[in-house]
Image (spheres, grey):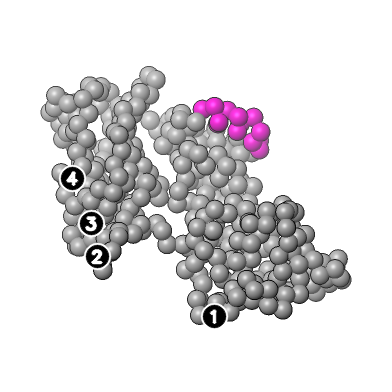
Amino acid sequence: MNDPSSAYKVETTSRLAQWKIDNLSSCTYRKSDPFKIGKWNWHLSVEKNRVLFVKLYPEISNLTRENPPIASFSIRVICSAGDRKALTHPGITDKKLKTNDDFVWQVEVPLTGKFIIDVEFLDLKTSSPDGGEPSSIWAEGIAKKQSNATALACLGRMLKESIHTDITINASDGSIGAHRAVLSSRSPVFSSMFAHDLKEKELSTINISDMSLEACQAFLNYIYGSIQHEEFLDHRLALIRAADKYDINDLKEACHESLLEDIDTKNVLERLQSASLYQLPKLKMSCMTYLVKFSRIFDIREDFDAFMQCADRDLIAEIFHEILIAWKGF
């Protein structure tokens, strides 16, 4: 027998919330359990009379009163039976949500049987205390936070201005000067290269032919503590490959955590492949959940079919295992 409390539970990832509702009768009101996205606890509610009313709002708290979320999100209602018809709201951009009446969606199309309310948070902002522009709670870079700005400023300048460089790194489309001591201190692989009589020590060069010059620059900027947030975001997959290759665990973990934050239909398959290749369990599970439990697999059928033609056999088996579990649950 199904647990009655599960009727109010909302499943979440870092930016996605999904509420599965089973046979909502007429003249019925239902409010979900609280679920956490960003800094706030949220609720969904549905009221079915002649039409269906769907509401999304933050739980009332001191945080909500003092600093209410300014939300951008897409929301849709998916009929779970038949061809999984989806009714999609036009979308909400930068709307301040404080009460349960700030966002109300009146769904005119009649619904019967099971359906799913699916909310994808595109951004969450808070007002600036000095009256400036609102800032995104997801705009702060993990890589940047790990830097000690005062100590690393000099290292960054050494790299940028090529001060006393003693090693050349050849990327696929260009070269960059660097410092053996810095590379050795950050990577046991680089340290081994320079400690033994390998060609890298003799020729004072390192060939990294699987990285572009731009990605290699981002890699070195991270090592030297001067990477910028947008640069980090643009090159996360290349950086995680380099981190795995050169055994730089903090970079690998920073990429891993960041890749969890913005999974969507455009990148989920590439990230799933990377998660399997570089042994990133949290990313793999999040991608699996996004595809299977949240049914995004139906939105990218052609891409998914092509992915399955070339994916690793063990990964394919894991995907089918998750699909079987999902079928049993709903």
Answer yes or no: is residue 250 visible. no
Answer yes or no: is residue 67 visible. yes
The reply to whether the magenta stretch includes residue 238 is no
The reply to whether the magenta stretch includes residue 306 is yes
Q: Earlier in the sequence, mark 1 or mark 2?
A: 2
From the viewer's perspective, is residue 118 above or below residue 14?
A: above
Res 315 quadrant in image: top right
* Crowd around label 2: few <14 · some 14–19 · many ≥20 (10 Å): few
How far apart marks 4 and 2 lie (CA) works out to: 22 Å
Name the residue tied to disc 1: 151
- Give the residue type that dot 4 points to: Asp
Name the residue tied to disc 3: 68
Q: Earlier in the sequence, mark 3 or mark 4?
A: 3
The front one of 283 and 234 is 234
Name the residue tied to disc 2: 131
- Give the residue type that dot 2 points to: Gly
How far apart marks 3 and 4 lie (CA) works out to: 11 Å
